[in-house]
Amino acid sequence: MIRDIQDEIIRLKKEKNICILAHSYQAAEILEVADYTGDSFQLSVMAEKTDADTVIMCGVKFMAETVKILSPEKKVILANPYAGCPMAEQMDKELISSVKEQFPDYTVVAYINTTAELKTICDVCVTSSSAVNIVSKLENKNILFIPDCNLGSYVAKQLPDKNIKLLQGGCPTHAKITEAEALKAKALHPEALLLVHPECVPKVTEKADYVGSTSGIMNFAEKSDHKEFIIGTEVSIAEHLQYKCPDKKFYPLSIDLMCHNMKITTLMDVLNAVNGTGGTEISLSDDMIKSAKRCIDKMIELG
Ligand code: 13P
Ligand code: SF4
């Protein structure tokens, strides 16, 4: 049955010149029908390159907005209308405008997990894979990093010459993992390397053998000669790695590392988005696209 649905999605997307983008946290049956899969930086680059008329995003809303900002002429559909990122909604334009007034000589660096509206008043975007590199290339020493204080403090640690101001935001899924859970997982699997996403709290990233984005973690595990890994990011990554490397062992750092927003998209949502009966079209004003695009372009240029 799943195979039949996948075949229909593949037939329809070819017929209608649709490109399907899927974040790596999506289910395996969705990744199989996608044209491109990857982390948020890779998807934003692919979004700009594809010449499809319509792009279907299997991920969360800010990712679909990023595609629309980079390709306003394309029809962009978020496969499941309820898939949002709670972190992206934590800070709004009003709050950050008032913080900017207090710190006028700071460059505002926005994690890509922010709304299109908030991006309009920021200077540059970063993703987890590009944050250290991009912040290191900024001329200004003074940086206001929003919204993720865990990614921000990871960047600050790598770049001690920068003066990085953080606010209290972050990913509720990654940030709830505790140092005790990291220690417990290491004790349970003493031969395994601990690979952790920088959205985790510093006490967890400090225990890691490798800290990196979703694709950074996947590449590290695939290339490593090591045979066992504790995966400190969304649980789906341990599953996907197990398919890619059947001779290695992958243990989720915690079963609580599950992003319900990423998990809400189903293969049927993808079919309904492709056949025109489901999903939600992303619509942003021309002004918003123009203003938000500046900081995404800057990210692509510097990254
Ligand atoms: P990546 O940039 O690693 O894909 O992270 C996106 C995300 O939402 C992680 O929680
Ligand atoms: Fe947002 Fe966290 Fe889910 Fe990523 S894992 S989409 S940052 S809530």
Image: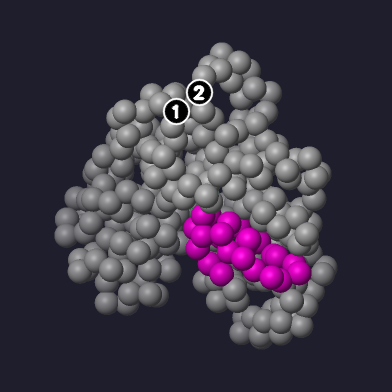
Instruction: Check disc 1 and report its element: helix, strand or loop.
Output: loop
Q: Residue at x 61, y 30 (%)?
A: 91
Q: CA distance from mark 2 to mark 1?
A: 7 Å
Q: Which mark is residue 140?
A: 1
Position in image of residue 211 (x %, y %): 32, 48
* Front one among 1 and 228: 228
The answer to whether the residue bearing label 1 lies less than 8 angstroms from the nearest atom of ligand 1 is no
Q: Which mark is residue 249?
A: none
Q: In this view, which residue lies farthest toward the left?
A: 191
Q: Would residue 232 be found to the left or right of residue 15 on screen?
A: left
Position in image of residue 112 (x %, y %): 56, 44
Q: Residue at x 30, y 30 (%)?
A: 160
Say which label, 2 or 1, has the lower sequence index. 2
Q: Amino acid at mark 1?
A: Asn
Magenta-highlighted residues: 36-60
Which quarter of the image is occupied by the N terminus? bottom right
Q: Residue 84: tell me if it is visible.
A: no
Instruction: Check disc 2 and report its element: helix, strand or loop.
Output: loop
Q: Quadrant of residue 119?
A: top right
Position in image of residue 130 (x %, y %): 44, 48
Q: Amino acid at mark 2?
A: Tyr
Q: What residue is disc 2 on?
A: 106
Q: Would residue 148 be found to the left or right of residue 228 on screen?
A: right
Q: Would residue 251 be found to the left or right of residue 67 on screen?
A: left
* Front one among 14 and 132: 132
